[in-house]
Image: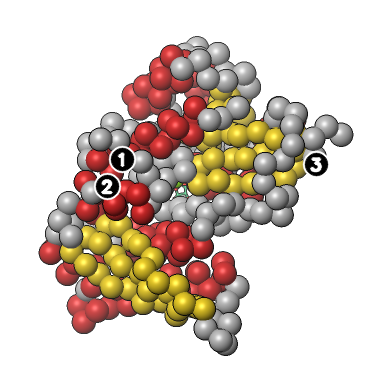
């Protein structure tokens, strides 16, 4: 068997199911998933071993028309993922169909002459009769090399996609240790798990006005870990909502995040959250850097 290794960028509109697909293909919870759009803020690497092939899957932030500096940095991170990829998967929510957003992403992919595969996701939600016309409409817009129909949630079709990717990777040595699942540092994972709970437990603009940074990580002699994280919000009103009456909301966010993290790290976690109001954090270079994002200027 030939030793192969390559990068695969997963791109699409916010909420298409990119992170769900990454987690499903690697069999691990590497990237956070919520029902809200614009959940992912930076590139997340998932390492998929398939025979002698190492497929380096890169989950990216959804591509949309960005306004804030944070949003521009997120979209720029997605396009960087595409530039570095051997194959780009355009993930389309089959239920949502061919939206203006999808059209505009395809136009950019064509302009950049990327090697692109089409993946229709959420086929469990879309009626079967709609899938062929949708595929026809999409493939009329770009020369996709291959088309797949999957459900990232049920796993339908995902195996066939993994097989095809493994076979399509260029020959070459593996770039990561075969046992690794990601290169995401644990401190960043901890912050993401807290952010996931904020996306799940708060609404309207609050999750979008929030970022989380791990401040300290202390190993304890009993094998547990103490994690202190700061939650930044832009407005005083957000701080009140996030903390909740008698601190109920932040307590619930912390408790759930602690349980999820404990499971992922396979150890006991003591999690302390400190909510700070900081106007304009979403325009600050240092806050973007903490997320591993480049300042788009
Ligand atoms: N029914 C169904 N739901 C799905 C499927 N794939 C993803 N979802 C749901 O779609 C929502 C968004 O999924 P994500 O994986 O966070 O989507 P994303 O493309 O990473 O979104 P951003 O990070 O915001 O760009 C979640 O509620 C998922 O559970 C699928 O195949 N079927
Ligand atoms: Mg995502």
* Closer to viewer: mark 2 or mark 3: 2
The percent position of residue 250, horizontal first and vertical second, equals 29, 73
Q: CA distance from mark 1 to mark 2?
A: 6 Å
Q: Nearer the viewer, residue 25 or 154?
A: 25
**Which is more N-terminal, label 1 or label 3?**
3
One can see residue 216 in this view = yes
Which is nearer the N-term, disc 1 or disc 2? Answer: 2
User: Is residue 237 toward the left or the right of residue 226 in the image?
Assistant: left
Q: Residue furthest bottom?
A: 222
Q: Is residue 211 above or below residue 273?
A: above
Q: Quadrant of residue 157?
A: top right
Pointer 3 residue: 51
Mark 2 lies within 8 Å of ligand 1 (Cβ measured): no
Q: Quadrant of the N terminus?
A: top right
Q: Residue at x 51, y 58 (%)?
A: 185
Indicate whether 59 appears above or below 248.
above
Whether the residue carrying mark 3 lies under 8 Å from ligand 1 is answered with no
- Whichever of labels 2 and 3 marks the residue nearer the N terminus, that label is 3
Q: Residue 285 has which mark?
A: 2
Judged left or right of residue 221, residue 158 is: right
Estimate how packed mark 3 is, as few (under 14), some (14 to 19) or many (20 or more) residues with alpha carbons within 10 Å.
Answer: few
Q: Are marks 1 and 2 in contact (CB under 8 Å)?
A: yes
**Secondary structure of residue under mark 2:** helix
Q: Which quadrant is home to the C terminus?
A: top left
Which numbered tag is attached to residue 233? none
Query: Percent x, y for residue 190?
Result: 45, 65
Residue 222 versus residue 17 in the image, above or below: below
Residue located at (40% from left, 48% from top): 292
Q: Position of residue 162 (x, y in %)?
A: 69, 38
Q: How many marks?
A: 3
- Camera-near label (3 vs 1) is 1
């Amino acid at each position: 068997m030939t030793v192969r290794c390559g990068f695969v960028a997963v791109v699409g509109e916010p909420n298409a199911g990119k992170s769900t697909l990454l987690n499903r293909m690697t069999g691990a919870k590497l990237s956070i998933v919520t029902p809200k759009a614009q959940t992912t803020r930076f590139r997340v690497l998932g390492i998929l071993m398939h025979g002698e092939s190492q497929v380096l899957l890169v989950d990216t932030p959804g591509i949309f028309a960005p306004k804030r500096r944070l949003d521009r940095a997120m979209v720029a991170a997605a396009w960087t993922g595409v530039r570095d990829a051997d194959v780009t998967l355009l993930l389309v929510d089959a239920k949502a169909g061919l939206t203006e957003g999808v059209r505009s992403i395809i136009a950019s992919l064509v302009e950049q002459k990327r090697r692109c595969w089409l993946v229709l996701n959420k086929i469990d939600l879309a009626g079967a009769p709609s899938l062929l016309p949708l595929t026809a409409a999409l493939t009329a817009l770009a020369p996709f090399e291959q088309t797949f129909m999957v459900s990232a949630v049920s796993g339908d079709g995902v195996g066939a996609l993994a097989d095809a990717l493994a076979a399509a990777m260029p020959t070459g040595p593996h770039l990561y240790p075969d046992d690794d699942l990601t290169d995401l540092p644990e401190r960043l994972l901890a912050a993401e798990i807290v952010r996931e709970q904020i996306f799940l437990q708060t609404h309207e603009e609050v999750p979008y006005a929030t970022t989380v940074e791990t401040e300290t990580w202390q190993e304890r002699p009993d094998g547990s870990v103490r994690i202190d994280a700061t939650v930044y919000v832009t407005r005083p009103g957000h701080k009140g909502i996030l903390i909740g009456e008698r601190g109920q909301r932040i307590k619930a966010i912390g408790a759930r995040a602690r349980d999820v993290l404990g499971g992922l790290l396979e150890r006991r976690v003591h999690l302390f959250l400190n909510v700070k109001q900081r106007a304009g954090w979403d325009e600050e270079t240092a806050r973007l850097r903490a997320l591993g994002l480049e300042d788009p200027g």
